[in-house]
């Protein structure tokens, strides 16, 4: 049986972010996700989540300055410290919400660049190891190039190869049907 989580970054936008938890619960959802919680304190987010008897399905590690086009750091060779800082920033939110899955955004980089590939693999391995100590899975989500041109992780086969090569039990693929259909088509064959 499929399970659905309300994405509070996309739904109930007529309400302030913290009020969307109650709206999701009233709409019948038992779980929520959102892109980024970092404009509010971990305690505020945790209180709204638990006060509405909701489970946190997922959220993203800090991606940088979204308004300036940043979409993560993992594939950017000179931004490894930012990857590490984003994990430290996310951990209080993970503790407050009880989330068991975090998504690491790859960033805007050319996947044909060996330095970007090496940076991505290093960032993924380090982040998965750090999150394993907290019993949290690291999710890799390919994102289609139509919505985010130049996004490094825009191929499901490449994501699967990184996961298979690193062989880390808490490193998983976040399979977004929307992105899969745009990137590869024929989602029924996936």
Image: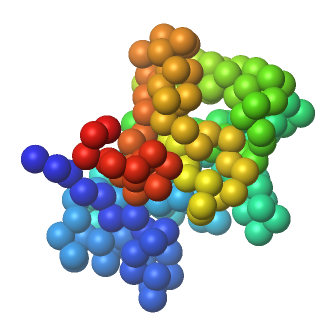
Q: Where residue 96 sits in the image (x, y, percent)?
A: 46, 48
Q: How is the image coloured?
A: rainbow
Q: Quadrant of residue 146?
A: bottom right
Residue found at x 49% / y 69% = 9
Is residue 160 found left or right of 21 in the rendered image? Answer: right
Residue furthest toward the front? 186
Q: Where residue 118 sits in the image (x, y, percent)?
A: 76, 21
Q: Is 89 located above or below residue 14 in the figure?
A: above
Is residue 29 found left or right of 181 in the rendered image? Answer: left
Count of marks placed on residues: 0
Residue furthest toward the right? 78
Q: Where residue 119 sits in the image (x, y, percent)?
A: 77, 26
Residue found at x 59% / y 43% = 154
Between 170 and 163, the one lying in front of the other is 163
Q: Is 74 located above or below residue 144 in the figure?
A: above
- Assign the C terminus to one quadrant of the image: top left
Residue furthest toward the left? 1
Between 11 and 183, the one lying in front of the other is 183
Residue found at x 30% / y 52% = 55
- Residue 16, can we see it? yes
- Residue 96, can we see it? no
Q: Where residue 84 sits in the image (x, y, percent)?
A: 73, 32
Q: Is 94 located above or below residue 123 in the figure?
A: below
Is residue 188 found left or right of 165 in the rendered image? Answer: left
Q: Is 54 located above or below residue 106 in the figure?
A: below
Is residue 10 found left or right of 117 in the rendered image? Answer: left
């Amino acid at each position: 049986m499929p399970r659905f989580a309300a994405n509070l970054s996309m739904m109930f936008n007529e309400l302030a972010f913290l009020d969307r938890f109650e709206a999701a619960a009233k709409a019948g959802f038992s779980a929520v996700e959102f892109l980024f919680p970092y404009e509010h304190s971990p305690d505020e987010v945790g209180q709204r989540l638990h006060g509405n008897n909701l489970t946190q399905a997922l959220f993203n590690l800090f991606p940088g300055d979204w308004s300036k086009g940043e979409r993560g750091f993992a594939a950017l060779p000179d931004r490894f410290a930012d990857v590490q800082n984003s994990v430290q920033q996310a951990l209080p939110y993970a503790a407050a919400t009880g989330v068991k899955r975090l998504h690491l955004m790859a960033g805007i980089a050319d996947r044909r660049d060996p330095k970007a590939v090496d940076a991505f693999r290093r960032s993924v391995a380090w982040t998965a190891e750090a999150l394993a100590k907290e019993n949290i899975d690291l999710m890799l989500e390919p994102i289609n190039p139509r919505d985010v041109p130049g996004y490094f992780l825009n191929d499901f086969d490449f994501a699967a190869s990184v996961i298979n090569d690193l062989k880390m039990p808490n490193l998983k693929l976040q399979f977004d049907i929307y992105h899969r259909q745009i990137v590869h088509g024929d989602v029924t064959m996936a």
